[in-house]
Image (cartoon, rainbow, N blue to C red):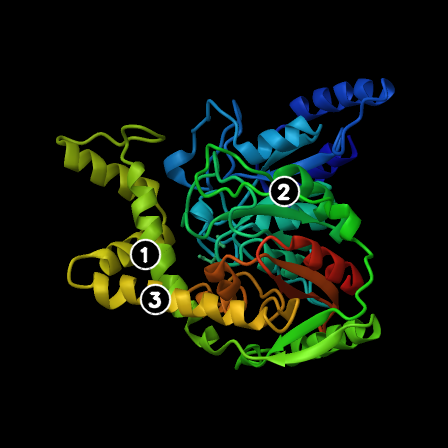
Amino acid sequence: RAHTDAIAALNPRLNAYITTTADEALKAAQQADDVLAKGEARALTGIPLGIKDLFCTNGVRTTAASNILKNFVPPYESTVTANLLRDGAVFVGKTNLDEFAMGSANITSAFGPVENPWKRNGDEAALVPGGSSGGSAAAVAAGLAMGATGTDTGGSIRQPAAYCGIVGLKPTYGRCSRFGTIAYASSLDQAGPMARSVRDCAIMLQSMAGFDERDSTSVNCDVPDYSAAIGRSLKGLKVGIPAEYRAEGLSAEIAAAWQQGIEWLKAAGCEIVDVSLPHTKYGLATYYIVAPAECSSNLARYDGLRFGERVPGDTLDAMYEATRRAGFGPEVRRRIMMGTYVLSAGYYDAYYLKAQKVRTLIRRDFTEAFGKVDVLLTPTAPTPAFAQGEQSDDPVQMYLNDIFTVPASMAGMPAMSVPVGLGATGLPLGLQLIGRPFDEETLLATGSALE
Ligand code: GLN
């Protein structure tokens, strides 16, 4: 009730939820009471969660924040949300996002922008929550959910977590099933938890993770006890500091927070090691070829025939055109255009194939670094949250937000953003931990020493 009341009071301003399910949630909470009374509680019994509106939820509208899916009601449940329901979670609503998860500020949603619950000291300007999981981050930060699901293709869990002062974890590619999650770039998309503490993320991930035969890229390996990693001794843990992340555009306050994080980990007994990830500088350029290429292919299914909205036309082609013109916003169209361009005959070798090769080099950088260290510590984003309206006219400027998050995505490594304090203007700052494949435990252990 506290959460549904908070949603009723604050959502009109924050716009964190596209769809709220208060009545269903209160009913489910009542049932959770009975389960608790019988002593049959599971890990998430009665816990109110927000679900990014990219996860298909059976019988509950799922829009991907796009006009093309504005009335789409899936007839099935995504594996990740089914796992959360199995463990007793109560869903309070579907959270806002950038259209089809394409963006870094949650300003491309067809349902309007999300507002960050934080403000700069002495300044009423509305700030962006980051993106694309901006609705989830804002909901969790403002107490409109105890936790939320996010998806991360190039930073969409970590960057909004940093901007809103919460914890966000992108698991190893393959750790969580992608079944029933609306696809953006399939070789990169990964679901993960967003919550107000590292421990809450561990509990949520426990439920979300696991092999699923309906996702051929889901990996069949054991899911360890994540909560057991919290508070684990860090004595002797080798923490790498990649030189290339001292990039241009890194704000002084984030550089200072990074240094502070290094000191805290030293004090916890970690050994700090300088490392190099030489191909970092190609991360962004490579990502913005691979991700649009995959998106142009994935979004071909929105043809007005099988899913969502249809705008009639005199011929089949005219119907496709009218449907897609009305259905997709400008950023999604830009990505489809870029993607079809880099995949087209004549450009495929120069762009897409080249990007795939560079992707391999980026992955090798990490593999080499993890021969020397156990975990990497970097900033999550170059700046804290910025004002709505700033940057939005320049897509390339917007893409620069992802400079520190995309390399781990390209390599498939697990990564987490942890809030480490407030900056000069009173806004939360986040640091990123990147780990070895399937070693989310080290992220959780190290993260719990930083938060
Ligand atoms: N900002 C990046 C993009 O627009 C990442 C988005 C994401 O991770 N879904 O592609």
Labelled disc at residue 222: 2
User: Circle 2 sits in a helix, a strand or a loop, which is it?
Assistant: loop
- Report x, y in % for residue 404: 54, 69
Q: Residue at x 36, y 48 (%)?
A: 329
Return the residue found at the far left: 315
Which of the marked residues, 2 or 3, is nearer the chain's N terminus? Answer: 2
- Report x, y in % for residue 229: 77, 52
376 or 21: nearer the viewer: 376
Residue carrying label 3: 357
Q: Which residue is drawn at 48% across and 33% down?
A: 213
User: Circle 1 sits in a helix, a strand or a loop, which is it?
Assistant: helix
Of circles 2 and 3, which is in front? 2
Residue carrying label 1: 334
Does label 3 point to a residue whose CB lies under 8 Å from ligand 1?
no
Which of the marked residues, 1 or 2, is nearer the chain's N terminus? Answer: 2
Does label 2 point to a residue whose CB lies under 8 Å from ligand 1?
no
Can residue 395 be seen here? The reply is no
Check disc 2 and give the amino acid type. Asp
State if disc 3 and disc 2 touch (CB < 8 Å).
no
Label 3, label 1: how far apart the Cα atoms are? 24 Å
